[in-house]
Amino acid sequence: MPCRSRRPVSTCRRRAAENVRRRHLRVATTRWRVQLDYGEDDDDDDDGKGLEVMSEPEGEEAVQWYPEGALHPMVLRKFEEVHYGLQPRQPLHFRLKYLSSQPAGSIRKALRRRGTWPSVVVDLKHMSGTVDPPTAYNDLTMPWAADLFYRVYRQMGREPFGIRAMMVSTDRELYGLSTEALHDFVLNWKRTFRAGAGGDESLETPLPVIHKDLMVHPLQLAEAAEVGAKGVLLVAGCCLPDLEHLLNTAYALGLEAIVEVYNDEEVERSAAAGAGVMVMSNINRAKRVMQKGNAAALLERWCTHLHTLGVVCLAGGGIRTHEDVEQVRDTGADGIVLGEAMMRAAVDRNADEAADTLRHLLTGE
Ligand SMILES: O=C(O)c1ccccc1NCC(=O)[C@H](O)[C@H](O)COP(=O)(O)O
């Protein structure tokens, strides 16, 4: 269910005029007007920081939607990061530098299921909030992670299933990594593949790296392209009114997007916005709870229809056992995102054990 607005859309124009006089920092996206209120405020009807849906053009129906629960302050935090971290970096130059002439599509193809086994995306994180208590993998370094997962990938290359993409989770509060770490991973990942191919770059193409963060603004996508990611994860619960706009920007930058969805409304609107890959999640980010079975239930309802639209369907969040994988596989899903299960298996730095864990998760053997 969409959230109730704190301010009716009809008041937005009036407020827009008022706000010209105010000392608010403002970031305009397609639909939202974001107020990051750090100035002195003499207007006591204002309740500080917030998100407003902007007025729709004449004749269009206004859509009222806000990130719910725990997501609301997180989305505001992301707008702050963009405002202070990315916007001062000559945004236009920064964004246009990466305009791509290449039509994207390879991640979608790579993740499409072939036969029995779901494709696998490994989600690299320094901290994991999807286990209780949350875990921190303090020893994790990017060169080590690149080397280890490359060796797992090579071992699985002899099997009819395996890792098809790497995801790096970079929100500091949620996952303990920064965009610099993503950059570090990308460089090491390429270097490792090259070394594995005897230094000949043409022999083996590195698997795509996907940047996962709470993406709310095009400049974050430009940054992902700048540090060498091939794809981005867009969490629908953080950006639904701007999703189409962010998808368009991603593709213009040569990035592919995976859209994380948690409920029917997010699936429906993401499909309408043109998402090519969706990951159905077991994690309710707004309430910060794991809802086991949610991804499988969404897949049951949507997978066949989404396949007719050409959308590749993944499941993620809390997939820990072979039974979890089977439940998702039986719905017709194309693939799975594995974070905690792979991080835990990899933490003793043993590629053989990590490969065994992956093999067991997929086959039960
Ligand atoms: O990944 C987290 O720690 C996390 C914390 C709070 C809300 C959502 C979170 N993750 C959502 C994800 O995308 C998962 O990392 C991904 O689905 C894999 O989950 P898992 O295999 O349980 O690590």
Image (tube, rainbow, N blue to C red):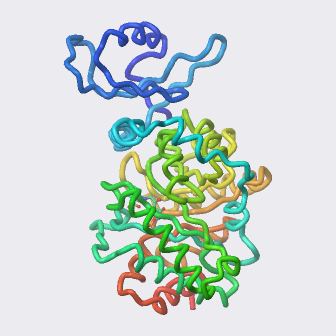
> Image check: 154 left or right of 114?
left
Q: Can residue 265 be spotted in the picture?
A: no
Residue 316, given in percent of the width and then of the height, sits at 52, 63
- What is the residue that sits farthest to the right in this orientation? 308
Query: Which residue is located at x 42 percent, y 7 percent?
Result: 14
Residue 351, given in percent of the width and then of the height, sits at 47, 88
Query: Which residue is located at x 70 percent, y 68 percent?
Result: 110
Quadrant location, ligand no. 1? bottom left
> Image check: 47 left or right of 259?
left
Report the front residue among 265 and 237: 237
> Image check: 79 left or right of 150?
left
Query: Which residue is located at x 57 percent, y 74 percent?
Result: 325
Residue 324, given in percent of the width and then of the height, sits at 53, 73
Q: Is residue 25 above or below residue 357?
A: above
Report the front residue among 325 and 47: 47
Query: Which residue is located at x 26 percent, y 13 percent?
Result: 45
Residue 244, given in percent of the width and then of the height, sits at 62, 37
Q: Quadrant of the C terminus?
A: bottom right
Q: Can residue 95 be spotted in the picture?
A: yes
